[in-house]
């Protein structure tokens, strides 16, 4: 009878690691629980850093390359801390045709960040999505979970400036 592989120690004394470990234990430390485990880490810490990816890989007995590959494949996972506010610009066909590129350019000009980046003061993260399911409102953005339709760069910047 073979023994299960030894589990790595928690990366720190932070109690949030116990929540992550509970997710893995509930799934029997099986590789098929990778996405659920990554969600658990991101829910607990806000993003996935190298330490967390290595811990998950060792705990689930998976190659780090596979864990990193899954974390970078799905846009829901963040590898850097998010800002206090998020702005997701839809780049689906309808939104793109109706001016999503101009929205992104306006935000780049005003805040000096590209999609996937956060302002230096951690106030705003700019993201893009292939579709937010609001094609009739094109170009659409999602600001802190609220869908805003028929946006123009100047009105979007004004909306973002009003956020505390």
Image (tube, grey):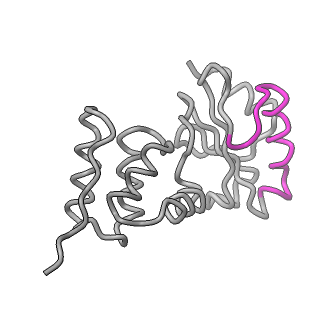
Look at the image and tell me in which quarter the C terminus lies: top right
Q: With 164 as the anchor, is 158 left or right in this view?
A: right
State whether residue 36 is above or below residue 1. Answer: above
Residue 99 included in the magenta stretch of the image: yes
Residue 68: % across, % down: 54, 57
Q: Is residue 108 above or below residue 122?
A: below
The boundaries of the magenta stretch are 95-116
Position of 39 with respect to 153 (left or right) is left
- Residue nearer the viewer, 20 or 92: 20
Query: In which quadrant of the rendered view does residue 87 lie?
Result: top right
Q: Residue at x 60, y 24 (%)?
A: 123
**Quarter holding the N terminus?**
bottom left
Q: Is residue 90 left or right of residue 102?
A: left
In the displayed structure, would residue 129 be above or below residue 163?
below
- Residue 94, picture quadrant: bottom right
The residue located at (73%, 25%) in the rendering is 158
For this rendering, which residue is in front, 139 or 48? Answer: 48
28 or 57, which is in the foreground?
57
Residue 52 or residue 163, whichever sits in front: 52
User: In percent of the image, x 61 and y 44: which residue is there?
Assistant: 142
Magenta stretch: helix, strand or loop mostly: helix
Q: Position of residue 5 (x, y in %)?
A: 25, 65
**Number of disc labels:** 0
Image location of residue 21, percent across then percent down: 25, 51
Q: Is residue 4 magenta?
A: no
Measured as percent of width and height from the top left, residue 152 is found at: 80, 39
Residue lying furthest left = 1
Q: Residue furthest bottom?
A: 1
Residue located 68% across and 43% down the image: 116
């Amino acid at each position: 009878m073979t023994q299960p592989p030894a589990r790595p120690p928690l990366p720190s004394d932070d109690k949030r690691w116990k929540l992550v470990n509970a997710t893995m234990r509930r799934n029997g430390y099986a590789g098929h629980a990778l996405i659920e485990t990554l969600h658990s880490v991101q829910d607990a810490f806000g993003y996935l850093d190298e330490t967390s990816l290595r811990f998950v890989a060792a705990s689930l007995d998976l190659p780090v390359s596979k864990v990193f590959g899954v974390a970078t494949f799905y846009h829901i996972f963040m590898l850097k801390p998010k800002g206090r506010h998020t702005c997701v610009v839809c780049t689906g066909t309808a939104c793109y045709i109706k001016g999503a590129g101009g929205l992104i350019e306006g935000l780049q000009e005003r805040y000096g960040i590209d999609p996937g980046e956060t302002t230096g003061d951690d106030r705003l993260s700019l993201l893009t999505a292939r579709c937010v399911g609001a094609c009739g409102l094109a170009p659409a953005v999602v600001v802190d979970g609220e869908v805003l339709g028929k946006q123009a760069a100047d009105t979007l910047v004004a909306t973002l400036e009003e956020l505390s």
